[in-house]
Each structure stands twice: as structure tokens, then as C-alpha cells.
Amino acid sequence: MEVIDIQQKFDQFNDHWHPRIIGELNGQHVKIAKIEGDFIWHSHEHEDELFMVIKGQLTMEFRDKTVEVFPGQILIVPKGIEHRPRAQKETQIMMFEPFSTINTGNVAHEKTKENLEKL
Amino acid sequence: MEVIDIQQKFDQFNDHWHPRIIGELNGQHVKIAKIEGDFIWHSHEHEDELFMVIKGQLTMEFRDKTVEVFPGQILIVPKGIEHRPRAQKETQIMMFEPFSTINTGNVAHEKTKENLEKL
């Protein structure tokens, strides 16, 4: 039952598209990542995914629309929905998702990150 | 897949200790509440609970210590742990917890809120 300071956790790494785990509860992880540039199109067969922007601006592309997410805003992507996150400048995001969630979902890719570090 | 603006949701109500649901995913609710003053001692038998402070200051009492949580910080209270939230001035909190979670946990009380509104 220690307080988790989100910014203090972001200060511990600099690479992009590489989520770290900062908390867990009820089979779900709280993760953070720094992102910049384009990610890949993917979906998660079994997991809904929550994105909250801490700093910067997250652009989420769907097949039929594009959504912009700013600090203080949340976007929930339901399972099965194809999406592609992007950020024009470095952006800090927080995610809530089940333990089983892989960052690239149904796609095996050089950007796939497994066995994430806990900060 | 609409963006959820947390502050815009807080603008829709003024009462204290009365959570609203602003999102759901993987059997979990995202809730927000305005709090001020003392809540009651309680615990949740089956649910871990995440608190994030959006504005103000959350004081969380445990039987053996007291923790202060500020904006940009998170506190996870594991199931079974007795806790009492307090706030000296009006504070905005966001919570992440399973659908089954009742605000007063194992205690039936006049502060118990069920059938929460979705904003």
C-alpha cells in the first residue's frame, strides 16, 4: 500500500513503445509507456484496453475514424477492434488491461514486448 | 469508442461520496467521485481497488498507517484490507474496480450507494 507517483515512474526510462508495469489489481495491470511516431495495426482478441493520456497527445486510428486523446482524457478500445496508436511528439500514456494483454495484440512483430519490467 | 473527458464528467454533479461510472472494460468499472470529510471504515472481501487523485488530496487511513495521495498519484488497496478515505477539502478521485464493488464494502450504511449512474 505504497503511493505510486506516475511522473516519478516515467522518469525511470526513455525508450518508446516499451510499456512498464506500475501496478496490478484484480488480474489487471496498470502500465505506462512513452510513445512517439506510429505503432502497428493490431487488435486484442480477448482484452478491452484503456488508454489515458498523461502528457502530450495520442492519436488513435480505427478503420473508420481517427480519435485524438489529450491529457485528462481516456479512450477505451473494446476487444476485437483494430486500432493503431500514433503520437506526433513524445507522449506519455497510462493503460489498464488484463495480465494477458500483449502490446501488439494479434500481431507478432519486432515491436512486440513480453515479460515487461515492473517499476 | 468516444473520448471520455474526466473533468467534463466531474462538471455534471456536485454531491460527495456518490460515485458515477464513466467507463467499463474487462468486468471493471472506471468511476469518479467528489469527496469531502470522512468516509467510513470498510473493506472489500473480493475486490482490489485503485484510487487516483485528479484534484485535491486524498487521505487514506489504514489500521497501521495513513497515506496521503496527491494529483498524479495512485494508491491500490488490496482486497480484505480495512481502509477509511478522507479529504480535508473537496477532492476529485477516479477509481478502477470490478463491477461487483460496493462503495462501503462489507458495511451496510447510509452512505452505501448502489445502482450507480453512468455518465
Image (spheres, coloured by chain):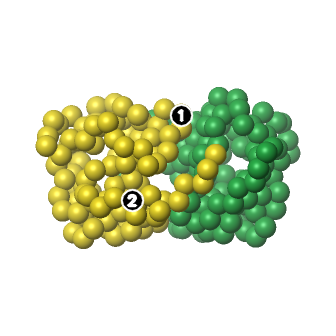
Chain colours: A green, B yellow
The answer to which quarter of the image holds residue B47 is: top left
* Local crowd size for mark 2, using a 10 Å CA cut-off: few (<14), some (14–19), many (≥20): few
Mark 2 residue type: Gln
Residue A104 lies, with reference to residue B9, above or below; the image says: above
> What residue is shown at x 66% (from left), y 34% (from top)?
A79
Q: Is residue B43 left or right of residue B54?
A: left
Closer to us: B35 or A23? B35
Residue B6 lies, with reference to residue B118, above or below; the image says: below
Q: Nearer the viewer, mark 1 or mark 2?
A: 2
Mark closer to the chain start, 1 or 2 = 2
The answer to which quarter of the image holds residue B68 is: bottom left
Closer to us: B60 or B52? B52
Rendering coords of residue B90 (x, y %): 27, 68
Residue A97 lies, with reference to residue B14, above or below; the image says: above
Rendering coords of residue B8 (x, y %): 47, 62
The answer to which quarter of the image holds residue A45 is: top right
> Rounded to the nearest whole Å, what is the CA distance between mark 1 and mark 2?
26 Å
Rendering coords of residue A55 (x, y %): 61, 68
Rendering coords of residue A6 (x, y %): 52, 63
Tell me the residue that label 2 is attached to: B12
Q: Residue furthest front?
A: B12
Q: Are the residues flagged by discs 1 and 2 in contact, CB closer than 8 Å?
A: no
For residue B15, the mark is none
Q: Residue furthest right?
A: A110
Q: Is residue A60 left or right of residue A37?
A: left
* Chain ID, mark 2: B
For residue B26, the mark is 1
* Chain ID, mark 1: B
Mark 1 residue type: Asn
> What residue is shown at x 63% (from left), y 37% (from top)?
A78
